[in-house]
Image: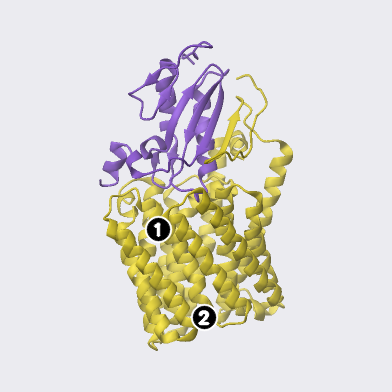
Amino acid sequence: MDGRPHERQGQMDHGMVNAARAIGRGAARPPAARMRGAGIARALFGALAGLSLVAGVAGGLWRLGVAVPDPRLFPWSGQVLLVHAALMICGFLGTVIGLERAVALRRRAAFAAPLACGTGAWCLAFGYAGAGAWLGVAAAACFFAVNAMLVRRQWAAHTLLLLASAGAWLVGNLLFALGHGGHAVLPWWFAFLVMTIAAERLEMARLMRRRPAASAALYAMLSLLLLGAAWSGAAPRMGGLIYGTALALLAAWLLAFDIARRTVFSQGLARYMAVCLLGGYGWLGIAGVAWALTALGWPMRDVALHALGLGFVVSMMMGHAPVVLPAVARIKLAFGPAFYLPLAALHLSLLVRFAPGTTGETLRAAGAALNAVSLAFFAATMAAAALAWRLRHGAAGAREFT
Amino acid sequence: MSAAPAPPGAAPEPLAAAPFPYEGPAALREPIVAALSRVVDPEVSMSIVDVGLVYGVGVDAQSVHVRLTMTSAACPMAELIVGDAELELDKVVPPDLQIRVELVWEPPWTADRMSARAKWIMGW
């Protein structure tokens, strides 16, 4: 090792080359000022997403009458309760997905999207509803531009689907800012999440052999989903039926064609991710049926929304956190069998929440509280895994990675 | 480190047996293939060589130049995988050679690039 200083060429876009860099040997570390800046940025985005998650979960619990934490201690509890979905979907997941995409694009300006939606969520939580909603619109518009740049870099079915998902988020945020109700807004917000996941799974599905008709079937289902979302504002019954059908069909497609069917037979992290995915697809199917039944007048709205939001989306999040956290937050995790515990807790708590159906409000509230406990358990498991990795690799390994 | 870089001006040595196009001294071929094979795409738990993400490696008197792609331009793990490749190469490449890992998007990745082992795992 000659210890020459780390020599980076930074981002060099020439032709279709995205980035190239050269390292001198034995000193592959960025300058201290840059590391400090990156650390501050990570803390800022962590705070934005973290507050959205905590406030969103609290709002969800208060809606079901679970007074933990005590809402009287927070002057904004009424507002937080009202914007539970916006905090969870836009504030937390929007910020995280925005960060993920900005890291992929490698453009500093792309971080404006998660910054705007995270800040917007703070505004919503502290009672500045108008500012929060329009910051959400700005965030989605910026996010759409980021995805358009990714399409320019790689014109492919999955990047086009990601662009369409960004469009769905923008429509949802515009409707929210214009004062439309949940029946019009939520289908677009969930379409954003569902299409994001579908696009990522389609990308991975290219590793498996499949019939050409499979891709066409997926596009048809996602078109149906968007049709259902668009129809839901004007005709909630028909729109909900279409939307629920599309979700259920999508679950069947993912169960049939996702690489998780193969990777579930591998080991370690890949198997854990596959279990998260397959479990999530089961909840997606249940959410689809519940969404359609809700449209027909059945009292299954809680099942429809939370089988989708928690069972499907959070399962995906739990599965991807071990690979996304190192990439986005520069936090490496030591994988272990303990990862399965919060996942099992989430799924069991959803069973508790949904099992009583229409009769057991107390049990439903208990299930929701256990959902929150599962999320906290997951966060604690990730923190312990990060600590375990640091202990295993020492401070030198952590610096090398930062 | 047993392998030595080619002397300046030496003709690169094309290699048919490597799982990706390789031009450089024969002594470095195996350690470089082994190093890149230790880099794992965490999503599928397979090496980037098996997934077919390595488009080629060239070694001259000054540097090792690796051309890598990702299955998706929207993949946030690109930086991480590039970093892992650099760390693994750093273990096997002579210290006087610079390591240059380039992320490229042309030609686009297709499943045809997967190794026979990867295809077997994925049920082809």
Residue A133 to residue A100: above or below: below
**Which residue is drawn at the image coordinates 70% and 71% (left, top)?**
A123
Q: Residue A21, which numbered label? A: none
Q: Nearer the viewer, residue A37 or A141?
A: A141
Residue A43 at what x, y percent from top left? Answer: 67, 53
Specify whether disc 1 shares its chain with disc 2: yes
* Number of other residues with Cα within 10 Å of mark 1, as a class: few under 14, some 14 to 19, many 20 or more: many
Q: Colour of chain A?
A: yellow
Chain of the residue under the numbered disc 1 shown in the image: A
The amino acid on which the numbered mark 2 sits, given as a three-letter code, is Ala
Q: Residue A184, which numbered label? A: 2
Q: Are marks 1 and 2 in contact (CB under 8 Å)?
A: no
Of pointers 1 and 2, the one earlier in the residue sequence: 2
* Number of other residues with Cα within 10 Å of mark 2, as a class: few under 14, some 14 to 19, many 20 or more: many
Residue A278 at what x, y percent from top left? Answer: 35, 60
Residue A187 at what x, y percent from top left? Answer: 48, 75
Q: Colour of chain B?
A: purple
Query: SS class of the residue under badge 2?
Result: helix
Please give the residue where the numbered disc 1 appears in the rendered image: A276
Q: Nearer the viewer, residue B119 or A309?
A: B119
In three-dimensional space, the C-alpha distance between marks 1 and 2, rounded to whole angstroms, equals: 29 Å
User: Where, quadrant-wise, is the N terminus of chain A in this rendering?
Assistant: top right
